[in-house]
Each structure stands twice: as C-alpha cells, then as structure tokens.
Image (cartoon, helix red, strand yellow):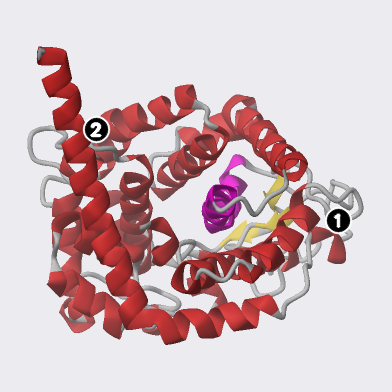
Amino acid sequence: MMRRIIIAGALVLCGVVAQAQQQWRQRVITDMSPAILERAAWAKQEAPETITAAQCSRSAGGKHDFYSEGDYWWPDPNNPDGPYIQRDGQSNPENFVAHRLAMIRFSRIMGALAAGYMASQDKTYLQQALIHAKAWFTDEATRMNPNLLYAQAIKGKATGRGIGIIDTIQLLEVVQALKIMEKAGAIPPADLAAIKHWFEEYLQWLTTHPYGKDEMNAANNHGTCWVMQVAEFSSFVKNDTLTAFCIKRYKEVLLPAQMAADGSFPLELKRTKPYGYSLFNLDAMSTLCQILSTPKDNLWKFTADKVKTISKGIAWMYPYVKDKNSWPFAHDVMYWENWPVAQPFLIFGAAAYNNTDYYRTWLRLDHDPQVEEVLRNLPVRNPLIWL
C-alpha cells in the first residue's frame, strides 16, 4: 500500500511539473508566434551547408574534420611569421571561423524549424530539418567526423585544443530539435539509428580523449559547457550512466566550485569580458537545469554548500540585465554594447519559479541577434523547444 502511495505521489508531482511547463510553453507560443513562424519560414527556405563547403590550408585535418582557430590569438608584431600570441578577450577577425559559422547556421535553422513545428504542428518544418540533419551526420559526401581534434588551433602552437570543444555547444538545439522530430515520428528508423550512432561516437570521444577530459576539468564556463553538451547528447541517445554523471557533476563540482555565496561567478568576473561571460555561464547552468531536472531530482531547487542555488545566480544577475547601466564591474573590452539579448536563463527561470518579472524582461529583449559574437555565445535561441 505504501509503495502505491509513493508511486501515486510521484505521478502527481510529475504531472504538476509537466503542466507548469506546458502553461509556459503555451504562453511563449501566444506571445511570440509571429516571430517564431517568421524565423521558421526563413529556415524552411535554406539549403544544407556543412563544414565540407569550406576548407583552411592551416588545418591538420581533412575535409570532414571541423576546424577553427583560437579567437584571442594574433600574429606577434615582433615575429610576424612565428607563433601567435594571446590578447585575451580580443577576437582576431583574420582567424578561420567558417566551420563555426556553418554550425551556428545549422543550429539556427534546426531550432527555428522545430519551434515552427511546435507553434503550428506543421510537420513540413520537421521534414526540412531532416534534410539538414542527414547532411551533417549521415551523408558520406557532406558529414562531419564525430570529434573536435582540430578545433581552436593556434598557429605555431597547437593543431587543436580541448578548449575547442566549446564550439559544439551549437549542437544543443540541433539535438533538441532531433528529440522533437523523434517524438513526432519524423525521422525514419534507419536515419534515426545513424544519427544517434554519430552522437554515441562523439560522446565516446568527449569522455575519453585527453581534449575532452581537459575540457571537463576546466574551472570556468568551459567546464559548464562540457557538462551541458554531454547532458543533452546523452539524454538523446539514452545513456543513463552519462546523464547521471552530469547531474552529479553539476551538484558536486560546477555549482559549488564556480558560484560565490552571493550568486556571482568570480572566475567570469575576472575576465576581460565579465558581463558577457557572466551571462554565458548563467545561461549554460540554467540550460543544464532545464535538461537534467526531473520531478524526483529537481536541480532548480538544489542547494550546494548550504547557500548556492541557481535561483540565487539568476537573482544576482537579473538587476544587471533589467538595467545594464547598474553593472558595477568593468565593461567588456569588446561587444559591450551587444548584450544583453533574450537570455535563456530568464525564460527558464520564469518557468521554474513562476516569475513573471523574468518573463517580461525576456520578452522585451532581442530574440533574433545577428552579431557573430552573440550568436557564438547564445546556443539556446529557441527556448520554446526546451519547454
């Protein structure tokens, strides 16, 4: 009898959480439907373009290998032909970023198409999304190899680095779209198996290669983004072991080690772009909570070190999003004027805590930014597909 009562209670709690998410999902559709469908209409007209469309002679990899160069590395004025030197926070516009831009475009298209389907129930959006997914993951002529051996290379120093793993945060909304497509029966079984196999291989690389291990152990937003990716990809391929590892990592490493007692992220505040990095890390942690939370294990309510919660992190940052002029720290060395936009922590926090102030602020911000730096650091652009 007791076991039945416990099960019944869990089902009621699950139903309450699902109903709350559904209410917020419908609210977003009601308030944002014209913009959602406009972006979906754009995405529906776009043809696939993968990393095979552009190559760089400096890459140590092949045609199907993702390649990018470290953003903050520049030619040494005292040795122009020698190894690059670092200028933290200052992006070198001459570096190769074509593959990253292609992946950002892929992410924007897949997210927009999935959101268009959720707002309209029109499956033609998902049919178009499948064409893009197959081009990236299964078509032999255009697919990407499931690793990041050559990401964020530095001329004269490294052919690739673990820090480059952050580039595939752009696959978050791709995978979330794939989940929606799978649930809607919009992916043929053979294609679904092949796509999942790609992510199984990528997860294997992320969790065993030295680059992946280095990134997992990064103390700042890079460590957060490693867990965020592994959490989303493992939930797609139903790797419960890795999903449980991510929950443990959030509770025992990310939140207690990165957040101060007041809710700030000191390691991000020390950077040359403290505002943008604080937004970015909070977005990533909030997205982690959205991915991993269950009625039984709700990370939105978890407390580390007796005082550290994601709600405190949102509450700390929120006044500086509502009124950026109140920011008491140094201004970012670049892109200060381009933040904030419609940060996902606002809508996820609104849904988790039923906070209409967060929601109203999210509504008034830019939902379709075009600046490359913003797009690079905003992998969740269609929160509707996460609710």
Which quadrant would residue 125 be assigned to in this image? bottom right
Q: Which residue is mark 1?
A: 142
Q: Does residue 310 sit above or below 22 in this rendering?
A: above
Q: Quadrant of the N terminus?
A: top left
- Judge by depth and name the residue closer to the eye, 71 or 39: 39
Q: Is residue 90 visible?
A: no
Q: Does residue 70 sit above or below 17 in this rendering?
A: below
- Judge by depth and name the residue closer to the eye, 270 or 380: 380
Q: Which circle marks residue 153 in the picture?
A: none
Q: Is residue 295 visible?
A: yes
**How far across and how far down the image is residue 149, in percent?**
73, 41
- Sequence-first tag of 2 and 1: 1
Residue at 23% in and 37% down: 295
The secondary structure type at the circle numbered 1 is loop
Residue at 50% in and 44% down: 229
Q: Which residue is mark 2?
A: 297
**How far across and how far down the image is residue 280, in percent?**
38, 60
Q: Is residue 36 left or right of residue 248?
A: right
**Cα–Cα span, label 2 and label 1:** 40 Å
